């Protein structure tokens, strides 16, 4: 039986080469890591917590929104990954698109205002290649993120060195993609296979859940994801707590965003306060750490907070090296 409702005919769509698109960003925004002169005290604590979690083999989970990719902080993250301070990265579908476009053509991000007027927004031939990569990877039992990372590495894309997905694939660190159907420009394309995206993304969710089982005495961080990060974290935490014979309550959470939050972040806002609906606060900073965890909030742009975290980690590593010597 088929639906009684008409569906949009995707064969009518006109895709244009990405070379014709005016992109707003290129790989020139990707910064070379340099130490910060000032570090937020909470990020110094998080650096220590990450090092302890690494040494104990506990989770060091990073969750990010797409603007992190667009902030040019990739190399800071690469070094945190290489030193073992990140063991899993969870992203949304937009992260995959920006990362792939950077790797493929060294440019990403279009003007929504410009291209939505002509109906060309998102409909670029090369970006749609992601749909084929996901479908092929899914058929081989790969998750969304692993399929993209493998493709970038194996095909030696021109700017693979800029790719978070490629770095994760090289290091064996899962980059899990948590897609929402209809959210991303690749879902506009005629070659989009919703079943493949759903299955590959759900496989990534189960990989994420597996890493969450190591959260006791671990760390989970959220940079700039208001919906995806707190929601997948909440569901995964419920699953691992349900399935585990050991308590999962002694861990640390960090949220870095631009909202103004009060000093006492462990107490969620009342329902008549608009900030009640800011999920990272009530979910990650209050409710899920109420049984013995610790939470930290740092207000700032990603191009400030991630370099500060990296600087704190570098200083900690130097201090520990000096102690050993």
Image: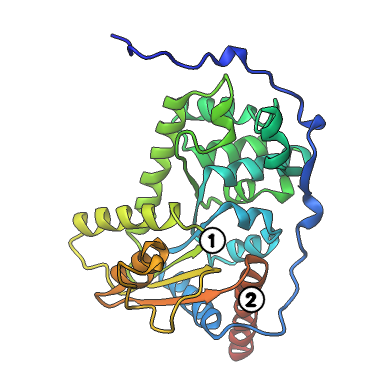
**Displayed quadrant of residue 243:** bottom left
Of labels 2 and 1, earlier in sequence is 1
- Position above or below: 308 against 37: above
In-front residue for pair 59/66: 66
* 257 or 113, nearer to the observer: 113
Q: Quadrant of the C terminus?
A: bottom right
For residue 136, above or below residue 41:
above
The residue positioned 66% from the left and 34% from the top of the image is 116
Task: Give the residue drawn at x 81%, y 30%.
Answer: 20
**Residue occupied by mark 2:** 308
Rendered position, 22 above or below 226:
above
Expressed as whole percent of the image width and height from the top left, the position of residue 239 reads: 25, 53
SS for callout 2? helix
For residue 12, side relative to residue 15 (left or right): left
Dot 1 lies on which element?
loop
Question: In the drawing, does residue 132 fall left or right of residue 284?
Answer: right
Q: Nearer the viewer, mark 2 or mark 1?
A: 1
Q: Quadrant of residue 6?
A: top left
Q: Could one spot residue 158 in this view of the protein?
A: no
- Quadrant of the rendering where the N terminus is positioned: top left
Report x, y in % for residue 144.
50, 37
Q: Residue 283 in the image: x percent, y percent?
A: 34, 64
Q: How many marks?
A: 2
- Name the quadrant containing residue 41: bottom right
- Which residue is label 1 attached to? 224
For the point 32% across and 58% down, the residue is: 213
Query: Where is 151 relative to 58, above or below?
Result: above
Residue 69, position as x, y percentages in the image: 64, 54
Examine the rendering and report whether any part of residue 55 can be seen: yes
């Amino acid at each position: 039986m088929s639906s009684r409702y008409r569906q949009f005919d995707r064969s009518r769509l006109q895709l244009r080469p990405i070379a014709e698109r005016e992109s707003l960003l290129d790989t020139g925004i990707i910064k070379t890591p340099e130490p910060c002169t000032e570090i937020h005290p909470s990020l110094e604590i998080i650096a220590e917590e990450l090092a302890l979690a690494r040494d104990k083999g506990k989770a060091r989970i990073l969750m990010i929104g797409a603007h992190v990719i667009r902030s040019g902080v990739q190399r800071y993250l690469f070094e945190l990954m290489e030193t073992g301070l990140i063991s899993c990265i969870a992203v949304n579908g937009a992260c995959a698109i920006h990362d792939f476009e950077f790797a493929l053509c060294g440019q990403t991000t279009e003007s929504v205002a410009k291209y939505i007027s002509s109906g060309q927004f998102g409909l670029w031939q090369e970006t749609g290649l992601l749909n084929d990569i996901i479908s092929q990877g899914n058929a081989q039992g790969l998750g969304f993120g692993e399929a993209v990372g493998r493709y970038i590495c194996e095909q030696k894309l021109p700017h693979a060195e800029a790719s978070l997905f490629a770095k994760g694939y090289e290091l064996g660190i899962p980059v899990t993609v948590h897609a929402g159907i209809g959210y991303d420009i690749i879902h506009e394309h005629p070659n989009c296979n919703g079943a493949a995206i759903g299955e590959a993304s759900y496989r990534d969710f189960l990989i994420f859940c597996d890493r969450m089982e190591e959260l006791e005495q671990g760390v989970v961080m959220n940079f700039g994801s208001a919906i995806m990060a707190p929601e997948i974290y909440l569901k995964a935490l419920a699953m691992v707590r349900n399935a585990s014979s050991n308590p999962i309550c002694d861990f640390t959470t960090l949220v870095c965003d631009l909202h103004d939050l009060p000093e006492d972040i462990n107490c969620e806002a009342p329902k008549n306060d608009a900030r009640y609906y800011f999920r990272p606060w009530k979910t990650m900073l209050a409710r899920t750490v109420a049984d013995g965890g610790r939470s930290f909030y740092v207000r700032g742009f990603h191009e400030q907070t991630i370099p500060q975290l990296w600087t704190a980690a570098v200083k900690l590593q130097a201090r520990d090296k000096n102690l050993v010597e």
